[in-house]
Image (tube, rainbow, N blue to C red):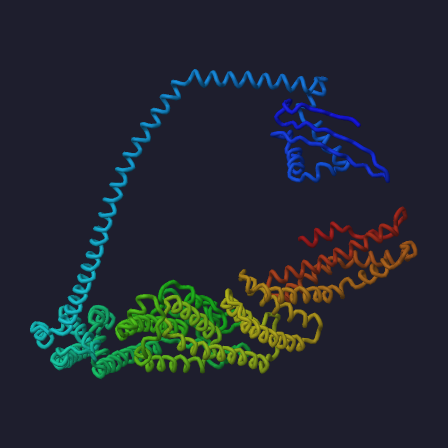
Amino acid sequence: MCFLVVAPSTFDNFVPVALTRSFQSNMTDTVHVDVLIGPTVTSKTTARARGNAATDPSRLFNLSLNEVDDRIMEFQEDELVKGALAKGIDLREYAREIEKELALVEHAHVDDYVAQDSDFSSLKTEIASCDSLLESMESLLAGFKTDLAKISGEIQSLQEQSLTLTIKLKNRTNSQNQLNTALEGLVVSPDLIKKICEGEVNEFYLQHLHDLNKKMTYVKSQRGSHIRALKDVGPELERLRLKASEKIRDFLTKKIDSLKAPNTNICIIQKNVLLKYKDLYRFLLERYGDAAFEVRSAYIVTVGSYFFASFEKYIKSMSNLQIVLADKLDLIGNDERGSKRCSCFFSPSGVGSTEQIKGLFGKAQLRDKTNVFSLGERIQVLTSVDSGIILAHVAEEQHLKFPFEAIFKSINRLLMDNCSSEFIFTSEFFSSIKKSKMAASGEPTLPTSSVFYEIFDPTLKYVQAFFKQYIDTSVDAVGVLICIRLNAQHLRAMQKRRIPCLDNFMNFINISLWPRFQGIIDMHIDSLRKAQLGKIRDAHPHFIMRRYAEFAVSILTLNEGFEDALLINSLNRLRGEVENLLTRMADDETTSKGKLTVYINNYDLIFTILSDNSVSSFDEEKAYFGGKLEAKIVEFVDEEMKPHISFLMEFVERAELENDVETLEIGRFESIALQFNNSWKAIITETNASILQGFPNFQNGARILHSALTQVLVVYKRFLQLWEKRFLGKSRKVHPIGLQAVVAEIQE
């Protein structure tokens, strides 16, 4: 048995422990522990362990050896115990020293408190004084609280009284407003009666009419109410309504009749007179529908007749100024001698020119390039920035003539301006008050009325009939296509103005123009199929090819920016028929060179005319005819040079197939060289004369001649290369002409 004893006064947080260990049998080890619980413990873990031991006495004597070891380890980990044991100090002696030190500290604190006794006494006195002051303040605040409670009650009472007065005032104000409204709506002053019945209709009359309308609106809204005055004022208002409606109807009818005067500017009267009094019509529309209908009908008849007569007169004048550019004889495939050749290009001054001169073939040609097939200056009607409206009397005085597209543009522009002005006026003047308020607030509204269409329906039908009459008989495809583009411009202009009144009219014109254009294309194709070519007397391009080229340029120019597939398909159909015609022309020639000459001259003419234009819409067409031209030139050069250098070409081709040039006969080489030496100048001279004679276009002939002579040089160079290989280091009887000499002769 062993003991470890620690004095209880050694540390405040340390507890003496007595351990008794006994050994029992059956391999059981039991530890009996006597624990003296002190005031504190060394650590939280120790405190919890000892606390559990203190509350549970049964555990004090039934601890296992492991638990005892844990307790010992906990005490050994305490810093004070660990330090004392490390120094070898007797713990009981150390505890007594600590007790002495604590006693000294206690006495020092007591002496300090005794020395400051007077301060504590003063502090007590001050605390008592503060308590008395706080008591007085508490009583004062209690009084304030009582007073505030009384004031709060008084304020609440005043609020209730104020609310009551406010309600009474509001009720009285509402009653007063209702009474004022009733008086304003029911009382008809003698002055109002006099102004309505006897006053002149002017701007001041509108104000009195507005007052009358307000009273009528109020009386109508009070139907079913128990106001006795309604029975008295109702008949008076009815009489005033009828009188005002009668005066307004007569006034508006008189203003509308003034539009019938000769040389009247309707727009000025509409803007300065009718729109200023539009509220008069709205009063009729709401208060006397029959009178409003009479005014509406009078306006439709008067203005409709005015526009119809004006456009009828203008269109008849334009018919006298129109010049016909084409008739049924002016088709691509028709004989030029039987065609009525007349031209009028739309110059900046508008003067037409029909002066003719002798052309290349001895036939009547126009001074200007512009004709029924080419566009020329006719495109100015599309690109000009001015309105394009023709003044009939000025044109008649100056004896000007215009193609149909210029007249088409002038009539349409005049129609657009008048229709836009009339549509805006009718939408504003004949609209009801409800629709006007909806439009002002930005709310969607239904179409105003059919007033505009009733006015312009006869005029639009007349203009449509005039256009359709020309369109159905026209064979001027260029003019019809220009009208199609003009119609598209006009439609975009009206859309930009946000005025839809002519949409149906322009769609009808568009529907009429496109089928006619296709019909004219079909007529051109049919004329090509039936074309009587006759015997071609010279090598010049055929006039039909020039017509086709100019016509293609016109179509492609007018298609720039639109890329209409319908136009491209029509042009491809026409091109196919032109090529068929060209094949028929070539078949009339008996020789291959003659056939190729026909192809080249005509392809060159078409390609040259197309090449004068650099816009993108021409690229596909230029590539097509350029490829055709190059292919035919290659064939022609081969055919042209075959009689002159066939002996040289055949020898070179066979010699180049041999693996060893040494196997070739020297005599054959010398024979070929001698033959070329004797004939090369004649070959160049004859080739030059033949090509330049067969191709009237100098540039085209020079290009073909260059290709032919280049072929001679290439073949002869190949022959010289074979010659050098065969006669390398050997004697020769014949010396071939040098390549530079041939080149010099060609350049001369």
Residue 72 higher or lower than 408, as above or below: above
In the image: residue 36, left or right of residue 544: right
| Nearest to the observer: residue 133 or residue 40 | 40
- Corner quadrant of residue 54: top right
Residue 627 higher or lower than 513, as above or below: above
- Corner quadrant of residue 343: bottom left
Question: Which residue shows up at 52% across the image and 70% down it?
Answer: 555
Residue 37: image location, x then y, percent: 64, 31
- Corner quadrant of residue 696: bottom right
Residue 134: image location, x then y, percent: 31, 33
- Give the total of numbered labels: 0
Residue 741: image location, x then y, percent: 74, 50
Residue 261 appears in view = no
For the N terminus, which image quadrant? top right
In the image: residue 328, left or right of residue 244: right
**Residue furthest out toward the right:** 663
| Nearest to the observer: residue 536 or residue 573 | 573
| Nearest to the observer: residue 85 or residue 280 | 85
| Nearest to the observer: residue 81 or residue 531 | 81
In the image: residue 225, left or right of residue 36: left
In the image: residue 600, left or right of residue 147: right
Question: Which residue shows up at 39% across the image and 67% down it?
Answer: 493
Question: Which residue shows up at 57% across the image and 19% down it?
Answer: 102
Residue 71: image location, x then y, percent: 72, 32
Residue 384 appears in view = yes
